[in-house]
Amino acid sequence: MRISEMLTAIASWLESPDNEALLLSEYDDQCIDIVANSCVAAASILRKAADEVDIIEPPEASNLTNSSIEELGQVANAFDSSGDENLKKMASVIDELLLTIAAPGKNDSEKKSEDTRLEDLRKKYQEPRDALNDMNKTSDSEKAIKDSPYSKEYRILEAPLSIRGCPDHPGAQVARVGEHTWQCDLDKKIYNYDTGFTLNNGSKVPGGGVEGQSSIQRQESHAIFDSRESRLQGFQQ
């Protein structure tokens, strides 16, 4: 055990409410107060010392050496040749531990080889597709289609349902030439908001109308004071 670990264990024991010093001092309140404060202060000093010593002292040597691995392999062989099923299972567990933990370098190399193989396969599938896209200039076509105004089509309420200005010429006046139909004063283009129209940039505005936006029936506020007789008399007039 390292010195820092021993100091930390002693500090944990001092901080524990079940240590013998606290249990022996329970007979008197003043005594247990002094003992508890002293244990906490001592534990704080020991933890600080453990942190400082941990930086100074060298790391503990690992018990996982080539000789210990070979000895563990011999134990696994002995278990496997014993004929006991439980010992054979233990031998299999030891072999798996030796492959996964005791020899990490081998597993790392196998994982790296597998990753390299997957990357090669990915390139074989991606390179033909990338070559075809470059040959056909697919990215340029996609960008042209995306930026083209002729492919844009408005949905209902994305464009105004009715305005008194020209949709193609902001600020230009329009003249009413029919029901929900207007004509621009500049280029004499006609816009029908019921059937829809196409702007000069190619954008398509669907047909629609403002009817029905305020179709909720509301009772007049003064009607709550009417009586049956007053309403009948009003109808007779």
Image (spheres, rainbow, N blue to C red):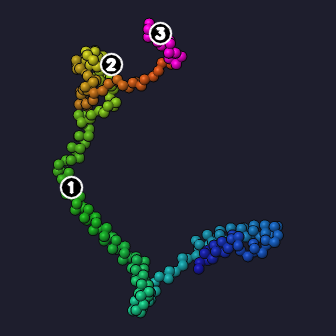
- Dot 2 lies on which element? loop
The residue where tag 3 is placed is 233
Q: Residues within 10 Å of mark 2 (few under 14, many from 20)?
A: few
- Which residue, as the protein is rendered here, is positioned at the far top? 237
The residue where tag 2 is placed is 164
The residue where tag 1 is placed is 129
Give the magenta part as a residue range. 223-237
Q: Can you give x and y, in whole percent of width and height, for residue 62 in the image?
A: 50, 80
Q: Nearer the viewer, residue 74 or 68?
A: 74
Q: Which mark is residue 103?
A: none
Is 222 colored magenta in this rendering? no
Q: Can you give x and y, in whole percent of width and height, for residue 112 in the image?
A: 33, 70
Q: Nearer the viewer, residue 46 or 86?
A: 86
The part of the image, by quadrant, that contains residue 156 is: top left
Q: Residue at x 78, y 75 (%)?
A: 24
> CA separation, marks 3 and 1?
84 Å
Disc tally is: 3
In the image, residue 229 sits, relative to residue 52, either above or below, namely above
Q: What amino acid is at disc 1?
A: Arg
